[in-house]
């Protein structure tokens, strides 16, 4: 049994408690239904922190979709399984949770996101297809739409592809701040913009050969490299 989280009497809190009590099975085929939910602690975090009118997007769907709908977010779901969307909408209708602000896009994220007009987003949840390279594409095509100060949630970091994405974001300390590791979920805050277009690959701490020194901001390292280059050139001129 999953650990039960303390929730309040708001609509998101009551909704989360109902999900915990009933454990509805939204995923899988009708003859083989399963529950691939976001962890209860992360759901509670969303229920407590997401405000009405937030613009949110998730790849995948499930309990998180229900909680974000209960929070009053203007929410976009990108996942290919129409039957799962219908189960979520039906459960919400039975429990007094409106889904009129939820847009379900029944397609694979790698096909939809590159040409999608995302607009500014306050929160992005990456919890869709975990096969390589889909999680990286989900991040790449949503990262710039996320506002500075916005929240990025990356779920299932125990899976290698997601773990690599989490480690990459942790290394990007000038662009992303790790807010919390909650079980198998990592929560980040976006610190600046842009975050997907470094002017040189060495400015990405994850890719840089001096990755071990990534605690030093890349701007400082760049300045030091330039100064050292000038000193080397000056030394060669003096030896001539």
Image (spheres, rainbow, N blue to C red):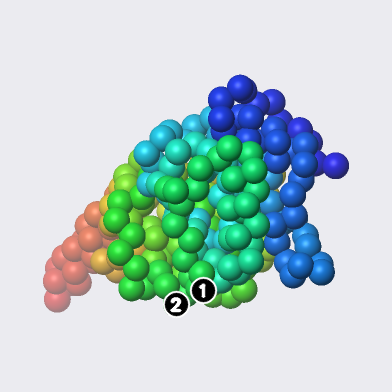
Query: Residue at 74% across / 38% down in the picture?
Result: 20
77, above or below 65, in the image: below
Residue 212 picture location, percent across and down: 50, 56
**Disc 1 element:** loop
Location of residue 130 (image quadrant): bottom right
Q: CB atoms at circles 1 and 2 under 8 Å apart?
A: yes
Q: Dot 1 corresponds to which residue? A: 108
Q: Quadrant of the C terminus?
A: bottom left
Q: Residues within 10 Å of mark 2 (few under 14, many from 20)?
A: few
* Residue 158 visible in the displayed image: no
Query: Is 52 placed left or right of 25 in the picture?
Result: left
**Disc 2 element:** helix
* Residue 30 visible in the displayed image: yes
197, above or below 183, in the image: below
- Front residue of 109/209: it is 109
- Front residue of 42/87: it is 87
Q: Dot 2 corresponds to which residue? A: 111
Query: Residue at 57% across / 33% down in the picture?
Result: 12
Residue 6 picture location, percent across and down: 69, 26
Location of residue 7 (image quadrant): top right
Numbered badge on residue 5:
none
Residue 29 picture location, percent across and down: 74, 70
Q: Quadrant of the N terminus?
A: top right
Residue 175 picture location, percent across and down: 37, 50
- Front residue of 72/153: it is 72
Query: Residue at 62% across / 52% down in the picture?
Result: 90
Q: Cα distance, mark 1 to mark 2?
A: 6 Å
């Amino acid at each position: 049994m999953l650990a039960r989280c303390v929730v309040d009497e708001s609509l998101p809190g009551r909704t989360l408690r109902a999900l915990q009590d009933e454990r509805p099975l939204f995923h899988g085929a009708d003859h083989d239904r399963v529950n691939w939910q976001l962890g209860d602690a992360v759901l509670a975090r969303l229920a407590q922190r997401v405000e009405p009118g937030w613009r949110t997007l998730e790849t995948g769907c499930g309990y998180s979709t229900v909680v974000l709908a209960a929070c009053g977010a203007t929410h976009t779901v990108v996942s290919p399984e129409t039957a799962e969307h219908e189960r979520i909408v039906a459960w919400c209708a039975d429990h007094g949770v409106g889904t009129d602000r939820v847009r379900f896009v029944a397609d694979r994220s790698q096909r939809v996101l590159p040409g999608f007009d995302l607009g500014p987003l306050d929160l992005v949840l990456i919890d869709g297809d975990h096969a390589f390279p889909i999680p990286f594409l989900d991040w790449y095509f949503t990262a710039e739409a996320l506002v500075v100060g916005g929240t990025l949630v990356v779920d299932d970091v125990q899976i290698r592809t997601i773990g690599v994405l989490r480690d990459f974001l942790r290394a990007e300390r000038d662009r992303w701040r790790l807010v919390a590791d909650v079980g198998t979920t990592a929560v980040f805050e976006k610190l600046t913009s842009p975050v997907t277009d470094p002017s040189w690959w060495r400015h990405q701490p994850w890719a840089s050969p001096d990755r071990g020194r990534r605690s030093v901001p890349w701007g400082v390292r760049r300045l030091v490299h330039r100064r050292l280059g000038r000193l080397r050139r000056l030394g060669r001129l003096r030896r001539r």
